[in-house]
Amino acid sequence: QQQTTHILVVGPSITMESMSILKAKRALPVLFVAAVVTLLVEDGLKTPVLSRSLRRQSSYAVVQTNAPQMHVPATLDLPSQRSLSLNLGGGDCKWTPPTYHVPDDIDFYKTVIAGFPSGDKRMIFLQMEALTGWPAKDEWDFEHIGMSNHPFIKANYPHHEGIWGWEDEADQVVMMVRNIRKSMVEYHDILWDIGYAKTWEDATLFLDKLYSERPPLSDFLVWRDERVLDEVDWYGWFIDYYMEGGLLRDIFTHKTTTKHHWDMLMMPTVYTRAELDYDLIVGADTVVEDAYDPRCATVTEGCAPVAVISAENL
């Protein structure tokens, strides 16, 4: 009332001041709404609405009490939230382990991670595990321990160190390619760690020695002189197999071959290299029609990789 009287007495010069006060009063509701929105957003960031909705704790969303139960991945489940990307600064990060128990009732689109032995396949599946919270499983474990619902399958097949142990569980293939020289050195190091084991059972006896120490240079040189040139053939043949969608080729001549010869090649501990000779089994002048590994028909998208990844670039 004192303000009104003042305006009436003083006149136009004070009327402008009055209008400013009225505008300020009108702005108060807008500021109040903005403050409320800010608090809601801040609270939402601290406890994500989606996460709280899935956990039936949200005060912002109505959740049906009789809604079908859905699997909540670790990335959205607040109580068990995984630190998927712990940024340590300077380009460093910390990997945390996935959930190793895989439920059978989840319909995964499963990926074979294929690569030459010691081709850094581990680099791919560790990142997949970190990003998704689900683990990878080795092809040999599928064969000897049993089938399971693991979404990522680590494979050396069709190399002689591998086996198609996952039956018809795969949907797609990604292939890792590493520098051939680094692959050969690391391949020997692992062979040395497991005592140059020829079977899965023998290899498991040495698992505690993997990556524990470097082999003597003299041991590597002996293996290099005996095996590397053959393994170079295996290296190129392995890449051809996947890039050509499972086309059957001889390992050492790289000629297309027959299913009979291929089956023999898949048993390197049974036959010697001389017994697997292409001219002996197939014939030097034989015209061979293209044939494909029938196992590739069990992969939803076939054996041709949906992605080829450079170990060095990754």
Image (tube, grey):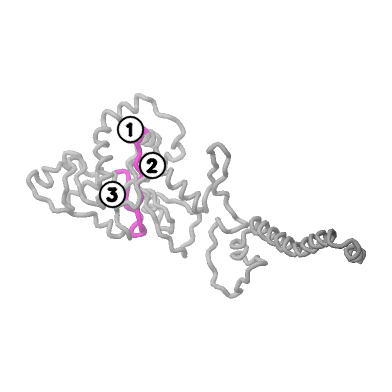
Q: Nearer the viewer, mark 2 or mark 3?
A: 3
| Residue 136 included in the magenta stretch of the image | no
Q: Kindly state the secondary structure of the residue where label 3 is placed.
A: helix
Q: Residue at x 37, y 41 (%)?
A: 310
In the drawing, does residue 246 fall left or right of residue 49? Answer: left
Q: Which image quarter holds the N terminus?
A: bottom right
Q: Kindly state the secondary structure of the residue where label 1 is placed.
A: helix
Magenta segment range? 160-185
Structural distance between the alpha carbons of marks 3 and 1: 20 Å
The residue that mark 1 highlights is 181
Q: Amino acid at mark 3?
A: Tyr
Q: Pinpoint residue 165: horizontal percent, then vertical percent.
A: 34, 53
Q: Which image quarter holds the C terminus?
A: top left
| Residue 180 included in the magenta stretch of the image | yes
Q: Which mark is residue 242?
A: 3
The residue that mark 2 highlights is 203
Of the pair 163 and 114, the residue shown nearer to us: 114
Q: Residue at x 57, y 45 (%)?
A: 86
Q: Residues within 10 Å of mark 3 (few under 14, many from 20)?
A: many
Q: Pinpoint residue 29: horizontal percent, then vertical percent.
A: 75, 65
Of the pair 105 and 126, the residue shown nearer to us: 126
Of the pair 256 and 22, the residue shown nearer to us: 22
Structural distance between the alpha carbons of marks 1 and 2: 24 Å
